[in-house]
Amino acid sequence: MTPTKPPLEPAADSHDLIRVQGARENNLKNVSVELPKRRLTVFTGVSGSGKSSLVFATIAAESQRLINETYSAFVQGFMPSMARPDVDLLDGLTTAIIVDQERMGANVRSTVGTATDANATLRILFSRLGQPRIGSPQAFSFNIPSIRGSGAITIDRGADKPRSESRTFALVGGMCPRCEGMGSVSDIDLTQLYDETKSLSQGAITVPGYTADGWATRIFKVAGLDPDKPIRDYSEDELDLFLRQEPIKVKLEGINLTYEGLILKVQKSFLSKDVDALQPHIRAFVERAATFSPCPECGGTRLSEAARSSKVKGINIAEACAMQISDLADWVRALDEPSVRPLLASLQQTLDSFVEVGLGYLSLDRPSGTLSGGEAQRTKMIRHLGSALTDVTYVFDEPTIGLHPHDIQRMNDLLLRLRDKGNTVLVVEHKPDVIAIADHVVDLGPGAGDDGGNVCFEGTVEDLRASDTLTGRHLGYRATLKPDTRTRVGSLAIRNASQHNLKDVAVDVPLGVLCVVTGVAGSGKSSLIHGSMPKDAGVVSIDQTPIRGSRRSNPATYTGLLDPIRAAFAKANGVKPALFSANSAGACPTCNGNGVIYTDLGIMDTVATVCEECEGKRFQASVLEYKLAGRDISEVLAMAVREALEFFSAGESKVPAARTVLSRMDDVGLGYLRLGQPLTTLSGGERQRLKLAIQMATEGGIYVLDEPTSGLHLADVEQLLHLLDRLVDAGKSVVVIEHHLAVMAHADWIIDLGPGAGHDGGRVVFEGLPADLVATRNTLTGEHLAAYVGTAAP
């Protein structure tokens, strides 16, 4: 009898790895890794070590690029063109779904409900069940206005003569006609728009972007206004033309343009956008020139009176959207309507997903632009929880940011559930609690910037603990409670704080110490500190607003460091400072100061080639002949912060102003960054520390930091604590909104809010010394902090 051969493994089952060979994006140094599919892989390493370059800029970017290539050339023409990552080989890729920390759209009309499609389902529900019946789902949408019209139409009748008929039509929308669905109305201070003592040619308009000789100002002359006449001398008709004229067509130097009054222009350009998403100088202008208040007609609900009149079980759609999502989920669960059962099931699943990811304290009418990075990421995560897709790659960027230790286990359960459905889960993370659940760990480093970009470790969590890598050594790190805490030198009184979910809170924030404000996500920390602190208290706030910069921006330009450097070069060589700017007179004419030339190939990848004339240095050859202590401007911009600090500290290249900025950058742990490195290549943790370096120069006695450990490795947290100590020892008061247990343990004073989130929070449940919080353990924070310090407590 012939023995039977064992069945061979199907070829399809052999593709169980994602292989990366020779990855060189940003600071990666020919990185090669093999990642197991249908497993949870965590990428660790210090901030700037290359984690995001490997996961997002290489693996996820190539997956999305390959998917885009499957569409027709016509469709690709409407999609963003993506270049192939700098890598030798990528094999075994699956469809990548990226769930990152990018803030959700800057559209003022976007809310949590519209961003997750919960509003769309709710509108259908009210159009079917609402009493009185007012119309289709669009009658409940604050983005659709009610429209009426009438006119004549011509009907063709074949061989007969066309016949004309009069018709009328009406479209019922839910938009409030007063505020046009914005929920607020603005009152503009005209003195902030123009100086009435000046004429247009003298620069009377003080709105950002308007100059005396610019197109935006010259168009007023074409519209019929005297550019040399002071605005205070305008007649009533001229003033109306200047401020309130409805759009009209005009021609300026042979070009057809639309002219409209200055007030209308400002409303469209600035006031219709999310204030938090504007550039700092624009935001300052808007806050100075406009006062926003809830719409008196709709009460801030954005909806028309008709939309608010239709109710289901005594609740209208505006009240439903204003409810805390956990309460709304209970209300939907109590609805027993067989006619809309599939609709209720879909809405129930979405609302329960909010609660599951720890966002049950939000409401559907919350503007999406006000969500933190962590909240935005978890909101994006909701649409994937109930997905039937399998064998896809989910890519997460620090999903535990903004989460209290109590909520991290819930996030871990969600990540494991995605994996157990047969998906590959890639997570960039620093928290030991998340690293602990990984099937596979990739540790990059050993340092940051040019000192990183290598794979230091690849294997299991147990092997990582036993390794001699920076992450392995810090994985079991536990901060200790300070044996001696500082004594306050005063206090800042907050009384009757009632913003958002705060319940008439009264608390004294100690001054001259390191005070940590903590509590579960949604407990009211930001409302208490950012929303309730006196405006005249000298507070310097460093929040999580992302840095906005183009590929022309770099640390030198963003921090203002380039100004004293240009002045030093100009003085040493007897020429004008503008020559030493790649965005001004000194720019290479071939590449316009970019250093590279971009060739657009339509639907194909945009090709970037190093400029042959300047060889990527961005400056004209004549400019590079000017030296400062033997270095030209391109060589200075290629320096790392530490090298530049030494260069500008002594000798003929001594520039005190530059040294001051560089010292602050080095203090926050950015000594490895190159001065001319594009901001677009910086990681999230690097960008936040760059903001901190700038704000340290601001005059103020109280520093408020919002989750400064975001994006920081365990080793970086130690350096951050030393920096906070230096600030306090220099006489500053430091208030930190934070969930990181090492920061809590290092605090001089803790204010703990809770006990829960949303309407279950908003109260101070503890204020005092960290040791007392550990001893009492009567709050969620106390329990976790006690477990964290363990026997390390003094």
Image (cartoon, rainbow, N blue to C red):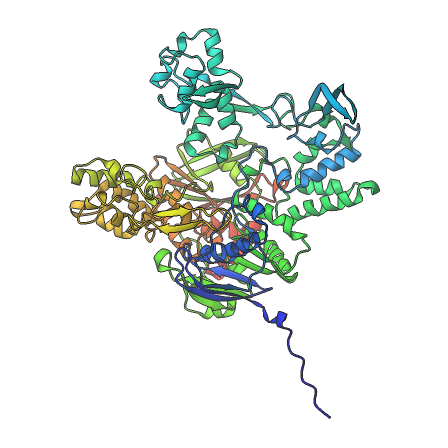
When asked about the image quadrant of residue 557, the answer is top left
Residue 474 seen in this snapshot: yes
Q: Is residue 740 left or right of residue 115?
A: left
Could you say where residue 290 lies in the image, as x and y percent from the top left?
Answer: 49, 23
Q: Is residue 21 above or below residue 2?
A: above
Camera-nearest residue between 266 and 599? 599
Q: Is residue 282 left or right of residue 187?
A: left
Camera-nearest residue between 501 and 783? 501
Give the position of the C terminus as an image quadrant: bottom left
Camera-nearest residue between 600 and 463? 600
* Total count of labels: 0
Single out the residue that lies furthest toward the front. 159
Residue 730 seen in this snapshot: no
**Residue at image point 58% right, 65% down:** 37
Could you say where residue 554 lies in the image, as x and y percent from the top left?
Answer: 35, 44
Q: Is residue 1 above or below residue 114?
A: below
Give the position of the N terminus as an image quadrant: bottom right
**Residue at image point 55% right, 47% down:** 76
**Residue at image point 29% right, 46% down:** 662
Q: Is residue 762 left or right of residue 157?
A: left
Camera-nearest residue between 302 and 265? 265
Could you say where residue 602 lies in the image, as x and y percent from the top left?
Answer: 49, 46
Could you say where residue 681 lies in the image, as x and y percent from the top left?
Answer: 41, 50
Single out the residue that lies furthest toward the right. 338
When asked about the image quadrant of residue 556, the answer is top left
